[in-house]
Amino acid sequence: MEKIKVLVVDDSALMRNLLARIIGVQPDMEVVGTAADALIAGQMITELKPQVLTLDIEMPRMDGLQFLERLMQRHPMPVVMVSTLTEAGAEATMRALELGAVDFIPKPKLDMNKGMGEYAAEMADKIRAAARARPRGRIVPAPAAAAAAPLRAVGNRPIAQLAAARMSSGAGDGRVILIGASTGGTEAIRELLSGLPAEVPAILIAQHMPAGFTKSFADRLNKYCKLSVKEAEDGERVLPGHVYIAPGSHHLLLKRSGTGYVTALSDGPAVNRHRPSVEVLFHSGAEAAGHAVVGVMLTGMGKDGAQAMRDMRDAGSYNIVQDEASSVVFGMPREAIAAGAAHEVAPLDEIAGRVVGQLMKSGPRAARLSA
């Protein structure tokens, strides 16, 4: 079996040694080298040809973001960021994902012996996913430019025209959009949301992400789209034109409340090794909303959410799954398709249009929406 070749880049000798030990004991991986800064790393990439890079953000001579931007322009390759658990670290991590990093993991605490086994398993999973990923440099528009960008078409009608139609979920028809994603999902979600008009029904999202990062993720998304995006809180009324991101420490659920919906947060056990879990969100959607749901499964490793997406379909939802060619990792979409959950399989750049198209032709207010 050919092993995944990994290069570890971190200015801390202690952290380099720790990460090298974690990766080196995996039977399907080998550490081909370690580098103390980005300039050394650049030379080692040419010489050692690693398949995956783990990259620190704060380094001397050239920081990780500068190095990542140059790397993705000249030699795109799978990169897993190793990030600090601070507000500044979270902001930098979100920027790294925009620049083309496949995924990230918080730096381990040096005194976390009890949890090191779990951390090592997570690190190994992320490296395996990165090795299978399709890395590509990204050119992300400035927030103002993204918000003003022309929207794609649904059939013969541009979404810009459809945006004027009222597509609210509140007291009208109870529609709601549920989205699940993992590896590669942060940028997929940004692209999807930036292609939606402000008048769409409420959107709830479960993206695999650790605590401490989801608020920065929500805040950045809020700058890039016409919708109001926030980290979800427990017991919030679910409103049209709003997006609720599952906090990194909790499952997010959709609950009925009179004629509408509210959010619910749970700190229950991880499901499919994840909290938040797509399975939990989609299962709650099947129970609370059924036929009123438009479900979307985006890029990600594993099978989280596949069975619950089938449950949503059985309850009457309409489901759209990202295709293999546009997925960074095709695991979760593939599993959803295998479970028979998908009505449509589409490239990422068409999903926003297909969501709007489904909203236009379904529900009791469809006649008015298409007028």
Image (tube, grey):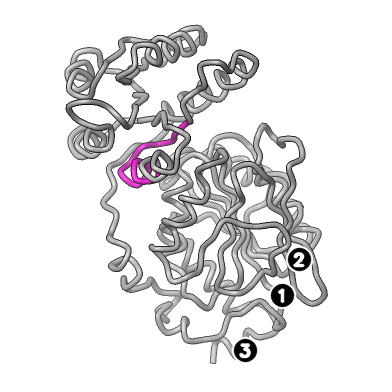
- Quadrant position of residue 18: top left
Marks 1 and 2, how far apart at CA: 8 Å
Mark positioned earlier in the residue sequence (3 or 2): 2
Residue at left offset 42%, top offset 84%: 161
Question: In which quadrant of the rendered view does residue 226 lie?
Answer: bottom left
Indicate which disc, 1 or 3, sits on the residue closer to the N terminus.
1
| Residue 243 image position (x, y, % from top left) | 56, 64
Residue appearing at x 40%, y 59% in the figure: 349
Which of the two labelled residues, at mark 1 and mark 2, occupies the earlier sequence position? 1
Residue linked to disc 2: 289
Number of marks: 3
Question: Label 3 is placed on what type of residue?
Answer: Ala
Residue range (magenta): 94-105
Q: Is residue 212 left or right of residue 35?
A: right
The image shows residue 208 at horizontal and vertical percentages of 57, 41
Image location of residue 144, percent across then percent down: 30, 68
Q: Which mark is residue 367?
A: 3
Residue behind mark 1 = 174
Q: How crowded is the residue under tag 1: few (<14 C-alpha within 10 Å), some, or many (20+)?
A: many
Q: Are marks 1 and 2 in contact (CB under 8 Å)?
A: yes
